[in-house]
Image (tube, helix red, strand yellow):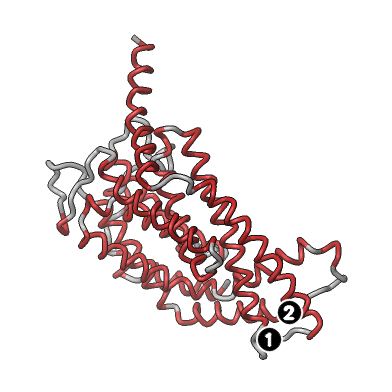
Amino acid sequence: MALWFVVVSAIERSKSVLALAPRERYLPDMAAEGYRVGGGEPLALALHRLTTEQFSIAIDALSDPTADVGIATAATLQSMARIAAVLRMVRASIGDEAYRTELRILNETTQLLASLLDGQPELRALDQLRSRYEPVLQDGAFTELRAHLLRRHQLKRLQALSEGEALQRTLHRLRRARARFAAWPLDDHTDARMYGREPVADSFEAVSAGLGRTYKRARRQWTTASTGDHDALPKLHREVRHLGHQVQVISSSWPDVLGATAAACVQLETVLSEEAGLSALGSVLSDPTVVAEETEASLLQAIVASTRTDLQQITTILGRRMFVEPPRLFIARMEAYWQAKDLDLDLDESRTT
């Protein structure tokens, strides 16, 4: 933790990082709506608000010297995924050049931080298995293996932190990106149409193509995974995460229904994340340098294989419910919800008159 404090302190002293304008000069106020379009809020303003909010969450997490490194990194990666989901959703509106430029920067930022979590998924997977099978396991089962995985994870994190430059570049990129997103034009009359960016129209058409593309990709990957092709699971995981974020953005059009849809995406994403951790743990167990007693290793391999099979079956069941509609019908339903939200507002207004 002392090393983390030194690295972040050095970053905060860097003139190149602090040269940007104070946040209150160009950032919108935090809103109660959070990560979704608020009632009556124009789409361009909402996307401007929620993306800059996510950048602020990431910057604050990484800038806090008292924060747990893993928690701060996870919060930042979550924010990056949410911003990427928005970019994917409005790609047709902002143009391919702006989309590719910003997505490349987000992906590079994510890669810079990934090393801080290297080894954590398999450690978490082992802890989950120990908790799940505790009633039938001997006391102290897999203790030596867990200690080995923990040392392995800590050494990789220490190596990443000791370099320091990754965190400095990450914070610098996040602050610059936040400033760019904050300057994104909100309408055709603004003077802030910088970098060739175009304003996002206040209509469902602005997001329908991106939302439909994400749903179609997720549905296709689920279909492939359901046939037994487990190589599709990581791609399905990514697409389901983006789909959940995008549905959450428009969930105010019918919170009861779309909130449940976003929650279903989170549930499927959680299952896929656990499956990915078990896959990584299985790969580690096949490494001859890993410290594990032979009988325990064999037992754990069997548990890992059995649990992965169960999770893959759950994935099939959840996906069958989630992807029952063809993409065209899914988008038509989302558009109907979007159009109906204005009727709700009209009804509320009529009651007050």
Q: Amino acid at mark 2?
A: Leu
Q: Kindly check if marks 1 and 2 are in contact, taking CB atoms under 8 A apart as contact.
A: yes
Circle 1 SS class: loop
Q: Residue tagged by mark 1?
A: 290
Q: Which mark is residue 350?
A: none
Between residue 318 and residue 73, name the one nearer to us: 318
Circle 2 SS class: helix
Residue 151: percent from left, percent from top: 66, 80
User: The N terminus appears in which quarter of the rendering?
Assistant: bottom right
Q: At x 35% / y 44%, what residue is drawn?
A: 328
Residue at the extreme bottom:
288
Q: Which mark is residue 145?
A: 2
Place residue 352 in its image quadrant. top left
Q: Is residue 249 above or below residue 218?
A: above
Tell me which numbered mark, 1 or 2, is placed earlier along the sequence: 2
Between residue 41 and residue 24, name the one nearer to us: 41
Between residue 22 and residue 102, name the one nearer to us: 102
Q: Residues within 10 Å of mark 2 (few under 14, many from 20)?
A: some
In the image, is 336 to the left or to the right of 142? left
Q: At x 49% / y 58%, what residue is drawn?
A: 222
Q: Amino acid at mark 1?
A: Val
Q: At x 74% / y 70%, what residue is drawn?
A: 303
In the image, is 172 to the left or to the right of 277? left
Residue 264 visible to the viewer: yes
